[in-house]
Amino acid sequence: MLSLWGIIHLLAALTLAPFLLSIIRRTKAVCAGRRGPPWLQPYAELWKLLHKGAVYSHTTTAVFIAGPLVGGAATLVALFCVPLGGVPAFISFPLDFLLVAYLLGIARFFTVSAALDTGSSFGGMGASRDVFFAALAEPGLVLALTALAMLTQRLTLTDIYAHIDPQLFGSGAGPALLLVAAALSVVFLAENARVPVDDPATHLELTMIHEVMVLDHSGPDLALIHYAAALKMWLLGCLLLGTLLPFRTGSVPGDLLIGVAGQAAMAVGVGVVESVMARLRLVRVPQFLIAASILAIVALFLVAR
């Protein structure tokens, strides 16, 4: 089923997703006592990269070129199925949340394949770490969404989040919802390569995970990777906000404004977390990610009992 308001949400996501990165940077700057970069800096960086030429090594194949294209396209299609609070998704059908998880996995697969295609030792190191951490984080995402589907007795993301309201937190479903929100929070930080799992601002190749995979990309390819990462942050933010802050105004335009404001507040929260916390040691990250699956499994038991 197609939705007109879903198109408006999609246009808002395509326009405002890079702005979340700006909010995170400005928040970190304020916490550090600095002024910070301009508000439109992410857009300027994308524009600059789009006007640069792409450089390809002679050792790469078509996989290296297809990686950013397929990854960006898969993330965009996944965004079609995700609602923003009370704003329905552009496309809705039973078990669409499984397709969302599958498409995010496809995007990662091609990004990792492009990193491995270069033959770079740093790219291979980052790709292996990313795949290992994804194997621990993605089950938490699927289990959390499955718990929400069982709780609401609905099979589409639009219907699932339409039946989540603040009153549920005061009922017997409250503990399960809090556990799902905690699991989605862990998945959000891990999938977006944020502290404490990864630090996108680091420049030490030996500790980088996501950024080291895209070191060999340049020009429009790198712009597409950064833009797809912003869309992914918006997508996962929709899932988290719909669970943790299910406020409704009674009108779709009002719900859209609340959703956008929630995304901005979430970006501020990420900036604060990155200002007060350090990234975990690599040997501690798996324990952090496994916690998401454990929380989601406990939520499933609470819902099923």
Image (cartoon, rainbow, N blue to C red):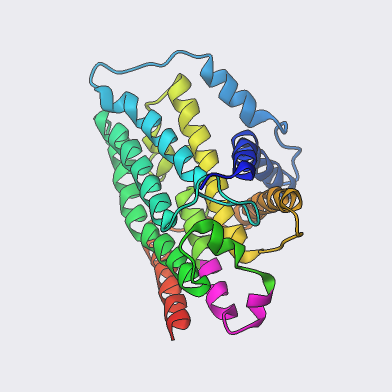
Direction from residue 280 to residue 63 in the image, left or right: left
Vertical placement of 169 versus 110: above or below?
Answer: below
Q: Quadrant of residue 61 in the image?
A: top left
- Residue 196 appears anywhere in the view: no
Where residue 101 sits: x, y (%)?
A: 40, 52
Direction from residue 78 to residue 43 in the image, left or right: right
Of residues 85 and 299, the one drawn nearer to the viewer in this rendering: 85
Where residue 191 sits: x, y (%)?
A: 45, 51
The answer to whether residue 8 is magenta is: no
Vertical placement of 211 versus 222: above or below?
Answer: below
Where residue 218 sits: x, y (%)?
A: 43, 22
Range shown magenta: 167-182
- Residue 107 appears anywhere in the view: yes
Number of marks in the rendered image? 0
Vertical placement of 175 versus 128: above or below?
Answer: below
Kindly identify the residue that appears in the image at 49 percent across and 36 percent down: 228
Kindly identify the residue that appears in the image at 40 percent across and 61 percent down: 142
The furthest residue to the front:
1
Of residues 162 and 247, the one drawn nearer to the viewer in this rendering: 162
Kindly identify the residue that appears in the image at 40 percent across and 68 percent down: 293
Where residue 43 sits: x, y (%)?
A: 63, 27
